[in-house]
Amino acid sequence: MTWFTFTWQNFLFSFLALAFEGLPFVLVGSLISGAIAAFVPSKMITGILPKNGVLATLASGLLGLCFPVCECGIVPVVRRLMNKGLPVSCGVTFMLASPIVNPIVALSTFAAFRGQSPWLNMGTRLVLGYLVAVVAGLAVRQLKPECILRTGAVKLPARKRLAFSISPLPDAAMNGFESTFSQKLVGAIRMACDDFIDTAIYFMIGAAVAATFNTAVDQQIILPLALEPTLSTISMMAIALILTLCSTSDAFIAATFVSFPIFARMAFMVFGPMFDLKLFFLYSVLFKKRFVIGLGIGLFVLIGLICSRFLIYVYAGQGL
């Protein structure tokens, strides 16, 4: 008996099911992200934060509920907000939390896990994403901005985004009356199209990998790995690091890895939107490489420990 048996019929059925479920959320997320970038002034976002630094960091983790931006476009938004005076700790918190703590991701997670305790998984993902982002933001408060930001990073001119560069996101507050509604609308559509194409490519690759894994790979091979809490959690986070999926659709991929326990899949859905290979390059445009590497290691350890040492008991108590 071979460990790998591939058939096109089974692959296409699984792949298309994932594509039809996930792509609508990718489209909606891209449209909302583009609209926020074009029409919402930076001062509107920074103006609602408390003056107290700690409270501002805590509040920054919830900004995604009002201004949902996926990880594909969050770095340009954070850079623009820092140019407007947003503290670095608040920027890091918003950057990490917004791709998870937002209504689009909540809905997609609920839809992906219907029949698998959707309310519990949706709530756990949002709460865990918020807590991890806030912990990271509070830790960044202890560091000097010059130790984190690249020299002149927040003053860099906007550039056209290809695969791993930053896209120009026009600021409605900076444009003032110079930009008409139609110009902003065109800009929003253009940015939404760019984000959708980039995100859809990664999602389709992830869907193909997941479909192949679930239909062609003998699940008995990976069963020993999936049964060990620490190894299963590390494995799922490593997969998230490589697949570089978008948070608006990654729950559909995670839900198919049924061989792995739910707490390991939760680690996949929290770590991936905060740090993957694509984000490593995007973060490096704004932050120093040393900080980006340290951030990735810190998130990996923190999320891994929470999921494999705490969430395992939460889900066990629910009989999952």
Image: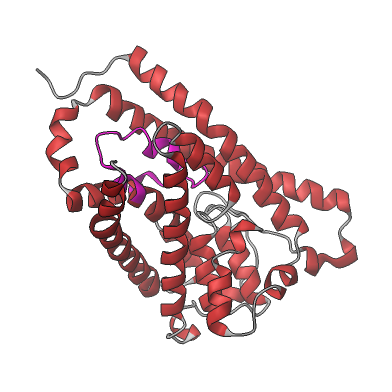
Residue 296 is situated, as x and y percent measured from the top left of the image, at 35, 64
Image position, residue 266 (x, y; %): 36, 49
Q: Quick one: 113 or 27, which is closer to the camera?
A: 113
Q: Which residues are magenta?
A: 242-266
Residue under the image location 68 percent in, 50 percent down: 34
Q: Quadrant of residue 118?
A: top left
Q: Residue at x 61, y 75 (%)?
A: 82
282 on left or right of 44: left
Q: Residue furthest top?
A: 9
Of the 4 image quadrants, the one containing the N terminus is top left
Q: Quadrant of the C terminus?
A: top left
Residue 88 drawn at (x, y percent): 53, 78
In depth, the one of 38 and 134 nearer the eye is: 134
Which residue occupies the foreground of this view, 14 or 57? 57
**In the rendered image of this protein, does residue 140 appear above or below residue 269?**
below
- The reply to whether the magenta stretch includes residue 250 is yes
Count the numbered circles shown.
Answer: 0
> In the rendered image, is residue 276 in sight?
no
Can residue 74 be seen in the rendering of this structure?
Answer: yes
Vertical comparison of 296 with 167: above or below: below
Left or right, 232 with reference to 176:
left
